[in-house]
């Protein structure tokens, strides 16, 4: 299960890999499963925090926990993309900015908007779908990230993202899609299939837009896809839960 171990080592702070080990194409098939494990962590933490804290504080702590456990990997990619995509006018210049370690105004503004929005969403989860959404949204967003890895070319000749492309095959995508579909159906019922589709649309739309600006994808771009997909899934899940209360009836509750 080397691929699973590498996926956990890359996407989380768990010390299961060495610094010399890089994620491989086989590990990306497990990205949605790692997301499901992150969701399970959020569910447990949420149950504990809600015993004595108001929802707004719980939302902030859940967000902080996700940033810590993932090393803010995807959020950092989103911030870099804000600077790179909005701070230049050619693919070459945008890619150069993405390499820059400095933080610009676009990253600050985009990061503040992203974190504020996610904080509000996590604090506003309806009780009847709270567990299901916490479990599923990190899984589906990482499934969307996996899709963009297979659908769009990589923009650089070298970089961490290139290791995720070498030896890539369709089975990895199929495993990721199956994980997302099963998780959505089990934990959110029929509504999970709607969120499954929303995750795909959000990831594809974001990936296509970024790929058009950069002439391909980068590691930072994959992180941005994940962040946008997370927000899209949470927003849609909350909205659908209010409009279609009977749709989210999972077998487990």
Image (spheres, helix red, strand yellow):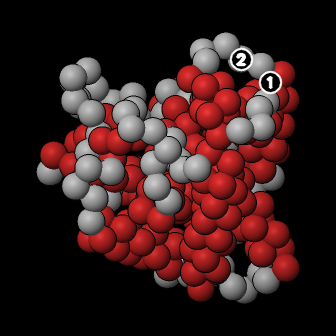
Q: Which residue is mark 1?
A: 108
Helix, strand or loop under label 1: helix
> What x and y, as percent, mark residue 196?
57, 73
Relative to 120, does residue 106 appear above or below in the rendering? above
Q: Is residue 109 left or right of residue 57?
A: right
- For the residue carrying disc 1, how many other residues have a C-alpha within 10 Å: few (<14), some (14-19), or many (20+)? some
Q: Residue at x 62, y 45 (%)?
A: 214
Q: Is residue 2 left or right of residue 32?
A: left
> What x and y, as percent, mark residue 63?
66, 36
In depth, the one of 176 and 154 nearer the eye is: 154
Q: Which mark is residue 242?
A: none
> What x and y, as percent, mark residue 127?
72, 62
Q: Which residue is mark 2?
A: 103
Q: Residue at x 22, y 55 (%)?
A: 167
Helix, strand or loop under label 2: loop
Mark positioned earlier in the residue sequence (1 or 2): 2
Q: Is residue 31 left or right of residue 139?
A: left
In depth, the one of 101 and 200 nearer the eye is: 101
Q: Residue at x 83, y 22 (%)?
A: 105
Residue 245 visible in rendering? yes
- For the residue carrying disc 2, how many other residues have a C-alpha within 10 Å: few (<14), some (14-19), or many (20+)? few
């Amino acid at each position: 299960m080397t691929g699973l171990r590498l996926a956990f080592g890359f996407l989380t702070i768990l010390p299961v890999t060495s610094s010399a080990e890089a994620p491989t194409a086989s590990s990306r098939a497990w990205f949605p499963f790692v997301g499901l494990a992150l969701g399970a962590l959020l569910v447990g933490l949420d149950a504990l925090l809600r015993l004595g804290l108001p929802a707004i504080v719980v939302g902030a702590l859940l967000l902080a926990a996700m940033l810590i456990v993932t090393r803010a990997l995807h959020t950092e990619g989103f911030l870099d993309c804000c600077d790179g995509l909005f701070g230049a006018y050619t693919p070459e210049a945008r890619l150069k900015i993405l390499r820059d370690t400095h933080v610009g105004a676009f990253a600050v503004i985009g990061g503040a908007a992203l974190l504020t929005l996610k904080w509000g969403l996590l604090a506003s989860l309806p009780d009847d779908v709270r567990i299901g959404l916490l479990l599923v949204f990190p899984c589906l967003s990482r499934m969307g990230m996996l899709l963009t890895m297979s659908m769009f070319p990589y923009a650089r000749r070298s970089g961490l993202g290139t290791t995720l492309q070498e030896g890539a095959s369709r089975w990895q995508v199929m495993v990721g899609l199956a994980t997302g579909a099963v998780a959505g159906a089990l934990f959110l019922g029929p509504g999970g299939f709607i969120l499954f589709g929303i995750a795909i649309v959000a990831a594809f739309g974001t990936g296509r837009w970024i790929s058009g600006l950069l002439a391909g994808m980068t590691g930072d771009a994959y992180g941005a896809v994940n962040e946008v997909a997370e927000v899209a899934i949470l927003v849609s899940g909350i909205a659908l839960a209010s409009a279609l209360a009977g749709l989210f009836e999972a077998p487990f509750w």
